Amino acid sequence: MDIKQLRYFIAIAEEKNITAAANRLHLSQPPLSIMVKQLEDELGVKLIERNGRSMELTDKGYVLYKRAIHLVNSFEEIKNELQDTEEGKKGVLNVGINTLSVSGFSEMLQSFYKNNPLVSLKIVQNDSLYLAELVKNRVIEIAFVRLPLEHRGLTYHHLINEPFVFVSNNVVPTISLEEISHMPLIIPSTEGLGIYNTIIEAFTRQNLQITSIAECSDMHVLMELVKGGMGATIVPKSVFDVYGAKCLFSTPISNPTMTSSLGVIWLEQHFVSTPAKNFMELAKEYYN
């Protein structure tokens, strides 16, 4: 007994006539008659009583009819759900975002949700190194990270390069790394992480000693410390766009080689779900 046989049996039960059922199914009559006989032999019960050209279900036939309706409908629902999942209309998207945040990320999420309301979103925020491990362990499927990052075993798609800006609670028209090196600085990361290394290397290349008074990877806390006058900071421009307050001011740094690279990673040579593919395409369009 298979789904095709059940569909045929439903048509016979509802039409109560082999000819009418055959017309409904766009089949000839003999295969339907043979199918009914095969079902009765397989199940060992009589399913249909014939009265001339009319057909009536036996009590066993009625039980099969009711069950067949349920099974065929469930089968169609499964097919539709699988199709929706293949098209990215349904499913789960586990996505990570770097602690420094990404300009426009909330807008992308809202746009994605608007077009995919049946996709369940799970969002994890952490440093890029930790997010890379989560991707490798398949806890999350994709992650937006900042370089430098060891991404062996991962596929990386570059999205944008953006400059760093100097942030303080005073208006500063122009500034260089040399001038910044004499100021108390709160580094927007912690030792060993990508952005931290980028900042240290930029100062080292110019033989400058950084005056670090604190390290902080929580951008809300960092901006509060700068607002309070504890020190200044340097962050990628999009971070200031997301976390900057009205009483804070950003100034471009006269060092064009100091940039932050943003990209998205996923597990190399592994299946990528359609919702993840759709979200990455949305991100590519947003940053182009």
Image: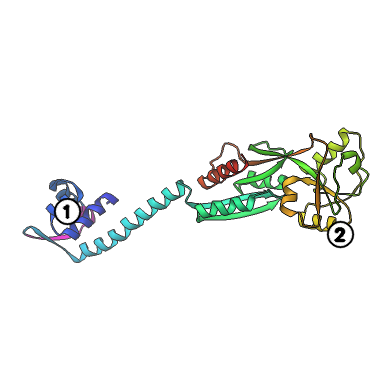
Q: Position of residue 203 (x, y in %)?
A: 87, 37
Q: Position of residue 53 (x, y in %)?
A: 7, 57
Mark linked to residue 178: none
- For residue 53, side relative to residue 238 (left or right): left
Residue matched to label 1: 21
Please report the residue visible at 56 percent of the width from the left and 44 percent of the height from the top. Answer: 282
Is 242 in front, or is 173?
173
Assess whether residue 172 is covered by the magenta stretch: no
- Amino acid type assigned to the residue bearing label 2 in the image: Gly
Is 218 in front, or is 49?
218
Q: Secondary structure at mark 2?
A: loop
Mark 1 and mark 2: Cα distance apart in space = 81 Å
Q: Earlier in the sequence, mark 1 or mark 2?
A: 1
- Amino acid type assigned to the residue bearing label 1 in the image: Ala
Please report the residue visible at 68 percent of the width from the left and 47 percent of the height from the top. Answer: 131
Vertical comparison of 138 with 220: above or below = above
- Range of the magenta residues? 39-51
Residue matched to label 2: 228
Q: Position of residue 150 (x, y in %)?
A: 72, 38
Q: Hey, which quadrant is residue 17 in on the image?
A: bottom left
